[in-house]
Amino acid sequence: MREAGTWWKANDLVFCRPDGQPIDPRMDWAEWKVVLQEAGVSDARVHVMRHSAATGICAFCDLFNVRHA
């Protein structure tokens, strides 16, 4: 990215740190736990919440669109 300057590391990642480097999984896990606590949601793995989000989305659109999103 030209706008980011010389500090940007192009790693072709979907989710990354502000400098383009990979996210540290330990920090990501710790931040996830804080988000759950602040939201008042019981402890859950990220993968479980992914399914919960998909279930909620299905209430507003058809399964075909959810599957191909």
Image (cartoon, rainbow, N blue to C red):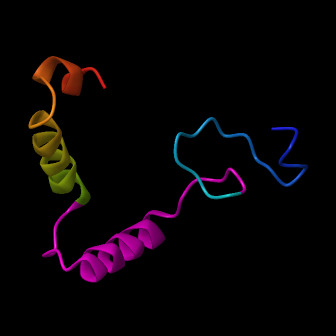
Q: Residue at x 43, y 66 (%)?
A: 28
Q: Is residue 24 left or right of residue 51?
A: right
Tell me if residue 13 comes above or below residue 68 in the rendering.
below
Position in image of residue 39 (x %, y %): 25, 76
Position in image of residue 38 (x %, y %): 30, 81
Residues in magenta? Answer: 19-45
For the residue pair 46 and 69, the one nearer the viewer reads as: 69
Q: Is residue 68 left or right of residue 7?
A: left
Position in image of residue 7 (x %, y %): 85, 55
For the residue pair 58 and 42, the one nearer the viewer reads as: 58
Tell me if residue 9 comes above or below residue 38 in the rendering.
above
The image quadrant that residue 55 belongs to is top left
Q: Is residue 39 left or right of residue 41?
A: right
Residue, far front: 60
The image quadrant that residue 58 belongs to is top left
The quarter of the picture where the C terminus appears is: top left
Q: Is residue 39 left or right of residue 7?
A: left
Tell me if residue 7 comes above or below residue 2 in the rendering.
below
Tell me if residue 7 comes above or below residue 25 in the rendering.
above
The quarter of the picture where the N terminus appears is: top right
Q: Residue at x 19, y 55 (%)?
A: 49
Q: Residue at x 73, y 40 (%)?
A: 10
Based on the picture, tell me whether residue 42 belongs to the magenta stretch.
Answer: yes
Position in image of residue 66 (x %, y %): 21, 27
